[in-house]
Amino acid sequence: MSLEWLVKIIKNYWPMYLRGAGVTLYISIIGTVVGFIIGLLVGVVRTIPMPEKGIKRTFLKIINAVLSIYIEVFRGTPMIVQAVVIYYGSAQAFGIDLDRLTAALFIVSINTGAYMSEIVRGGIISIDKGQYEAAEAIGMRHFQTMFNIILPQAIRNILPMIGNEFVINIKDTSVLNVISVTELFFQAKTVAGNNFRIFESYLIVCVIYLTMTFTVTRILRYIERKMEGSENYTMYANQMQVKSSGDIPHKAKN
């Protein structure tokens, strides 16, 4: 490795690296947020209690089957293959000419949604069943129970996994160079092709990726600590605190 070449590459190509890092973060943030919304909706639908019989039962079984296929397909195939099939396949099969950035956002979002749906479903299932029963006892419907009682607790429990998906998306956007999205890895390929210094060009990319993921991880851990709240708290009585039996006042003698 040549330190001189490393400095020269940073000096001459830093705008390209910066644009690539910006595109990577943009796709990762939007893809994670939209994917979380998709996963939230899918996870809630898949936890709807199955009716014993009737049209509703048939309809719900069909919906669950479709959602299960979606989850299995996008969790069971690499994102790079999904990118090629969706971007180039949609143009050849249906004549749809997608913008590369739009295609990238769509791919990352639906891929993340498949993983998020299982994360959300696991978070919902982890909540004590007694809370469902209590909500049902006071006449709350399934979606009222979900959005008012269950989901606030489930989201708090799965926050570390949501953050992990965000970090994974930052790294996995590199596969989008296959459809020529100008993210960070694509820019590094361009820089390496211009100066033929492979090691130095990609070493800079490694440092940028590490910086982004490290920063995001620390921010998410800070948010988690804030959401956990204080571990130590003091409970106060309505009028006075009784520290010991000696503090209880004696009745006055008649």
Image (cartoon, rainbow, N blue to C red):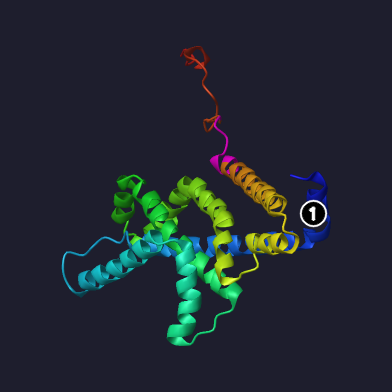
Quick one: 150 or 119, which is closer to the camera?
Answer: 119
Residue situated furthest front in the rendering? 196
Q: SS at mark 1?
A: helix
Q: Residue at x 32, y 66 (%)?
A: 69
Residue situated furthest bottom in the rendering? 95
Residue matched to label 1:
10
Residues in magenta, as a range: 225-232
Q: Quadrant of residue 187?
A: bottom right
**227 within the magenta span:** yes
Against 245, residue 97 (above or below) is below
Residue 60 in the image: state x and y as whole percent: 26, 69
Q: Residue at x 78, y 49 (%)?
A: 6
Against 91, residue 110 (above or below) is above
**80 within the magenta span:** no
Apparent side of residue 220 relative to residue 147 in the rendered image (left or right): right
Residue 202 in the image: state x and y as whole percent: 67, 53
Apparent side of residue 41 relative to residue 22 in the rendered image (left or right): left
Q: Quadrant of the N terminus?
A: top right
Q: Quadrant of residue 66?
A: bottom left
Quick one: 182 or 23, which is closer to the camera?
Answer: 182
Q: Is residue 37 visible?
A: no
Disc 1 residue type (three-letter):
Ile
Residue 148 in the image: state x and y as whole percent: 44, 56
